[in-house]
Image (cartoon, rainbow, N blue to C red):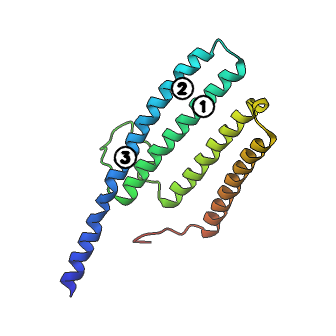
């Protein structure tokens, strides 16, 4: 019976590699974001001759895309290292300090923080173009942003109430 258990556990442990294609897909989505960033940047160049509000909204759109791309890489690196395998970069000088130190709780907080920041940028873009929005649309945008803020606050409170508990083996 112990032999069957050992085989089952080895199989389950090896199955973590089924996640690798998901992370490769996320890398591909960052490439799509880069393509879209280039398109938005070319629109910004054409917009420089236009209104100041248009340029500000264009720049905010680029910042928005950068935040999403950064978030994607945090998810890719932290998710891969938490669930699949450690990334061996040796002593590469460009290895981010946070790599290998972001656990699932940290990843959750980084995710909600990024979503709040992205939502805030979307709200700022709406305020810059307030004349083009109805009150109804603006209230929805504010309501969605406040919902994200409240959710982030709830996540932070739950993590704080959880204290210094560490999850996983050896704790």
Using the rendered view, name the quadrant where residue 120 is placed.
Answer: top right
Q: CA distance from mark 2 to mark 1?
A: 8 Å
Q: Residue furthest top?
A: 49
Q: Residue at x 63, y 66 (%)?
A: 158
The local secondary structure at tag 3 comes to: helix
Residue pointed to by mark 3: 25
Between 162 and 29, the one lying in front of the other is 29
Residue 6 in the image, given as x and y percentages of width and height = 22, 78
Q: Residue furthest left?
A: 3
Residue pointed to by mark 1: 61
Decide: few, some or many residues near mark 1? Use Cα within 10 Å; few <14, some 14-19, many ≥20.
many
Is residue 49 shown to the viewer in this render?
A: yes
Count of numbered circles on the image: 3
Choose the circle earlier in sequence order: 3 or 2: 3
Decide: few, some or many residues near mark 2? Use Cα within 10 Å; few <14, some 14-19, many ≥20.
some
Is residue 97 shown to the viewer in this render?
A: no
Using the rendered view, name the quadrant where residue 67 is placed.
Answer: top right
Q: Residue at x 28, y 64 (%)?
A: 15
26 relative to 101, above or below: above
Q: Are marks 2 and 1 in contact (CB under 8 Å)?
A: yes
Decide: few, some or many residues near mark 3? Use Cα within 10 Å; few <14, some 14-19, many ≥20.
few
Residue 121 in the image, given as x and y percentages of width and height = 66, 37
The local secondary structure at tag 2 comes to: helix
Q: Residue at x 44, y 30 (%)?
A: 35
Residue pointed to by mark 2: 40
Residue 101 in the image, given as x and y percentages of width and height = 45, 54
């Amino acid at each position: 019976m112990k032999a069957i258990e050992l085989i089952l556990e080895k199989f389950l442990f090896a199955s973590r590699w089924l996640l690798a294609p998901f992370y490769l897909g996320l890398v591909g989505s960052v490439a799509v974001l880069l393509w879209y960033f280039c398109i938005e940047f070319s629109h910004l160049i054409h917009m420089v001759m236009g209104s100041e509000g248009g340029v500000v909204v264009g720049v905010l759109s680029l910042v928005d895309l950068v935040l999403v791309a950064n978030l994607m890489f945090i998810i890719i690196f932290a998710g891969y290292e938490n669930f699949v395998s450690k990334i061996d970069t040796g002593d590469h000088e460009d290895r981010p300090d946070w790599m290998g130190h972001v656990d699932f709780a940290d990843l959750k907080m980084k995710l909600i923080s990024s979503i709040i920041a992205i939502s805030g940028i979307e709200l700022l873009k709406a305020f810059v173009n307030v004349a083009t929005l109805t009150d109804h649309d603006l209230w929805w945008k504010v309501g969605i942003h406040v919902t994200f803020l409240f959710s982030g606050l709830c996540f932070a409170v739950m993590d704080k109430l959880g204290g210094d508990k560490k999850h996983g083996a050896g704790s």
